[in-house]
Amino acid sequence: MSERQSPQFYGGPRECPSNEGRRQIQRILPRIGDVGGIPVARAIPQKDRRLIGPWCFLDHIGPVTDGPALDVGPHPHIGLQTFTWMLEGEILHHDSLGSAQVISPGQVNLMTAGYGIAHTEEAVPGHRRVHAAQLWIALPLAHKDTQPRFDHYPTLPRWTEAGVEFTLLTGQWLEHQAPVLHFSPILGMDLYLPSTAETPVSLSLPLQPGFEYGLMPMEGQFSVDDEAFSDNQLAYLGLGRDCVELELQPGCRLLLLGGEPLSDAVSIWWNFVGHSKDEIAEAQAQWLTEDPRFGTVPGYRGKRLIPPPLPW
């Protein structure tokens, strides 16, 4: 749904610094924008944090109670998976493989772009409420040219602990395993403390020291290591932690994202994720010349999206 319009070439430190023996937390303020009049808070990528494991893009969309009808025309992707976690409303996905799928609350749509794919996203008539997270997952070098595919996951692992509702979006958590396709070690999980809770809830969550992690509040407020976060402020935890202590306020919805850092540097420009400038430039030229690499999205009557000129 969303686009990058400046080049990002990834690298940099993965660990947060320590101060007097205490590991610090990096607070990343979102970039606020809109897509077709719908508010979007972008947590990554930003100058101060490019990746969290293989997660390379995080947009918090909405919530919108009566916004404009979503209509994102045909646009291409390479080298990534688009990952949509729906909380309110419905969105219709079409792609150049012929997939047509409505995503409803509590479901995940996953599109693996691989070598190349194009898709559209449109509002479903009668559904003007929109609240979702849309993320990109960078494919590792060995899988960047995998065959494109689309997967819809209507059922995900869910459980409740201490009044907090957990949904495992991808990866493994303790004895729980999500069915969602992935190509490198990864974790995505939604935590929600209903607003009807009478008091805050404290949690101690085990972590894998080889993963880096981030926490993103989509609603309400939470605290980690006695630091409060709200309003889409991302808490980057870095590598090397084996647990994290959280306190969720009533009404808090929190995304926990993690994964093993990719061994190869990646770059992102517009809707492309790649491992070199040449790779991205080739994909952009092919999209502009309507090369069959990306195919066409059947049934869509609007215009194709056109990228800005390459900056190099």
Image: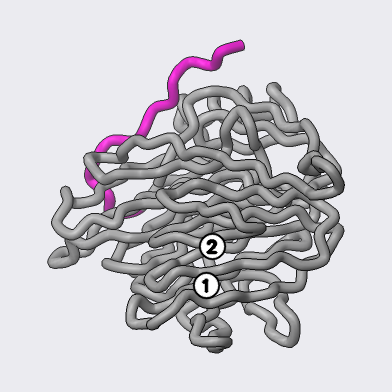
What's the residue at 38%, 60% (across, down)? 132
Q: Residues within 10 Å of mark 2 (few under 14, many from 20)?
A: many
Cα separation, mark 1 vs mark 2, equals 6 Å
Q: Quadrant of residue 272?
A: top right
Q: Pointers 1 and 2 in contact (CB under 8 A)?
A: yes
Which is nearer the N-term, disc 1 or disc 2?
Answer: 1
* Mark identifier at residue 255: 2
Q: Position of residue 125 (x, y in %)?
A: 15, 64
Looking at the rendering, in which quadrant would you find the C terminus? top right
Q: Amino acid at mark 1?
A: Leu
Q: Position of residue 85 (x, y in %)?
A: 46, 65
Residue 305 in the magenta stretch? The answer is: yes
Range shown magenta? 298-312
* Mark identifier at residue 191: 1
Say what secondary structure mark 1 lies in: strand
Instruction: Tell me if residue 272 comes above or below residue 170 in the rendering.
Output: above
**Viewer-side residue, 145 vs 30:** 30
- Residue 113 seen in this snapshot: no
Instruction: Tell me if residue 72 comes above or below residue 204 in the rendering.
Output: above
- Report the magenta stretch's main SS: loop
What's the residue at 43%, 64% (across, down)? 99
* Mark identifier at residue 223: none
- The answer to whether 263 appears left or right of 295 in the picture is right
Q: Position of residue 247 (x, y in %)?
A: 56, 68
Q: Amino acid at mark 2?
A: Leu
Q: Residues within 10 Å of mark 1 (few under 14, many from 20)?
A: many
- The answer to whether 90 appears left or right of 16 in the picture is left
Instruction: Tell me if residue 309 comes above or below residue 110 in the rendering.
Output: above
